[in-house]
Amino acid sequence: MERRISLSLRATDAVEARLRRHAPPSVLRAAYRVGWWILRPWWFLARPQTIGVKAVVRHGERVLLVRHSYGHRRQWDLPGGFVRDAEDPAVALRRELGEELGIVPDAARLIASAPSRIDHKREVIHVYAVDVVGEGTTPDAAELADVRWEHRERLPQDASRFTRRMVARSYWELWDEEA
């Protein structure tokens, strides 16, 4: 059975593509914020089914955290995004990391596929542990308000509970190839 992409995600993709071609990052950032506030009531009413990806980006004992410029902006989160229609989650992960942070994973392992009801969407989030060679990033100024590397055992107090759980899970010996 073929998965149908939600109307709100198709519309968001179309508007974003047009703005990215013609608008500076400050305008795009404002559009993300406005769009999020417009879509929240729609998500509450329609309860769309979506698929997302998140990444625990690791360099040794340090993990990359982001603050988005829209949504839950005060929380440190994991980078990620939506899976497009007929797109494999692993492909979406690499696309999102490239778009948002300008990074290419050295290695990626699926560590969780979890249902989520954040913002009233019915979403399945695929979470990957992603290893990178260095800590260099090129954050997208429109989507990301802040980016920082933190030691995995000293995450900021305002990191989301989901982020804390996935960071801990990404370092389980179960995922290590040497174990």
Image (tube, rainbow, N blue to C red):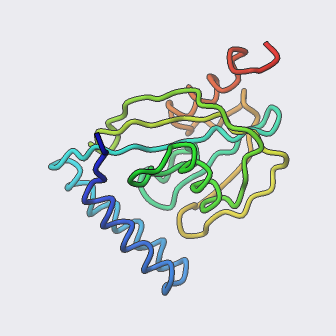
Residue 149 lies left or right of residue 65; in this view the side is right
State the residue at coordinates (30%, 45%).
2
Residue 46 lies left or right of residue 154; in this view the side is left
Residue 90 lies left or right of residue 173; in this view the side is left
State whether residue 38 is above or below residue 47. below
State the residue at coordinates (52%, 56%).
68
- Residue farthest front in this picture: 1
Q: Indicate the position of residue 101 as horizontal and vertical percent values.
A: 66, 58
State the residue at coordinates (50%, 78%).
20
Q: Indicate the position of residue 16 as horizontal and vertical percent values.
A: 42, 72
Number of marks in picture: 0
Residue in front for this viewpoint, 90 or 100: 90
Q: Quadrant of the C terminus?
A: top right
State whether residue 114 is above or below residue 95. above
Q: Indicate the position of residue 23 as horizontal and vertical percent values.
A: 49, 84
State the residue at coordinates (20%, 47%).
44
Residue in front for this viewpoint, 172 or 141: 172
- Residue farthest bottom in this picture: 22
Residue in front for this viewpoint, 152 or 96: 96
Q: Quadrant of residue 111?
A: top right
Q: Quadrant of the N terminus?
A: top left
Q: Indicate the position of residue 150 as horizontal and vertical percent values.
A: 74, 40
